[in-house]
Image (spheres, helix red, strand yellow):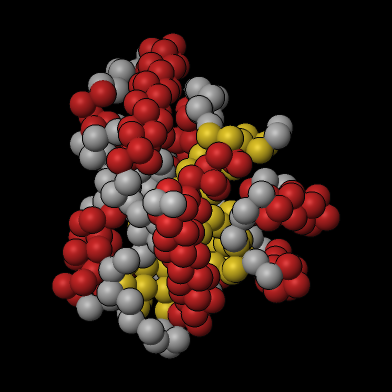
Amino acid sequence: MGSMTPTLQGFIDLHIHSNCSDGAFSATELVDQAIVQELTTIAIADHDSVASVATGIAAANLAGIENIPAVELSVQYKSFQDVHLLGYGFDHTDRGFCEKLDLLREKREHRNEEVLARVNERLAHEGRARIELSHVLVYAKGVIGRPHIARALLEHGYVKSVEDAFRRYLVPCNVPKHYWPVAEAISEIRHLGGLAVLAHPTTITSDHQELWRIITELAEIGLDGIEAFNNLALADDMEFLKRRAGEAGLLLTGGSDFHGIEAGLELGRGRGGIRFSASLLSPIRERLSERRKYDREYNRNRASLSNC
């Protein structure tokens, strides 16, 4: 799990994206930026991909900081689509899990190529030159994401910002994603010894009562924690989530959701410039330790029964 420095001091960022999904920077470049921001622990949580994990851990070890293996899965819960589930500390080398991610990545790749085709139809209608896939791949490492298309639109001078690209092209030209059922995704992360955390919860609903009902239901099927501190929550949202999570025994995490292309969004910082305290790490480490201890005991007991 990278270098597990047991400090409770300093700052962390447990939600960062590399160019192995829809970020602008490589894992090594993100580690370099984390050093500049004086972060002690990071988690590169790419969308449906663990391709950056090994490189990120190696770079972090060399730099003397910690990089926790992570992923951000697109899941569905009842009628709520594109709910984001963060996985932390799991076995990112598991072949079965990697094969499932490969399948998701293939579906995602085709989806974003369809989005690009729709964007080009709109550009043609406006009398503008099309954007070739090769232009988008300049900003991606393998699979393209909508932010990569946004950067190509910006580079061509068709939009004023990434936000403008989404408003004028990417949202109107969107193609639905393929989602994991949330119960299956939570079970998969826990089976691999990791923790399942709900990312930026208020993107599901801003109604606190309804949101807590959803979180409670997810906790009943194995959710470990919530990303209470993030760029998409207001101060009262974060306070509400912090208070209720404490009452329910859920872990708290914090992250910037940094991609490297959003205006005004910084690595290691949330809304209003808040920083994420390393004190969040102790309960996370304890829960991971408990889970791994349980898994070891379970496997030993199962092996003993099979030898009877």
Q: Is residue 22 visible?
A: no
Q: Position of residue 159 (x, y in %)?
A: 41, 35
Q: Residue at x 59, y 60 (%)?
A: 224
**If the image is split into quadrants, where does the N terminus sit?**
bottom left
Vertical order, 82 against 289 (above or below): above
**Along the viewing direction, whichever of 214 and 140 lies nearer the viewer:** 214
Outermost residue, left direction? 62
Q: Residue at x 74, y 55 (%)?
A: 216
Q: Residue at x 26, y 23 (%)?
A: 133
**Along the viewing direction, whichever of 21 and 297 lies nearer the viewer:** 297
Q: Residue at x 33, y 51 (%)?
A: 92
How many dots with numbers?
A: 0
Q: Is residue 244 visible?
A: yes
Quarter of the figure with residue 123: top left
Q: Position of residue 175 (x, y in %)?
A: 50, 22
* Left or right relative to 68: residue 72: right
Q: Position of residue 74 (x, y in %)?
A: 51, 39
Q: Position of residue 285 (x, y in %)?
A: 46, 74
Outermost residue, right direction? 209
Vertical order, 130 against 308 (above or below): above
* Left or right relative to 200: residue 141: left
Quarter of the figure with residue 152: top left
Vertical order, 191 against 226 (above or below): above
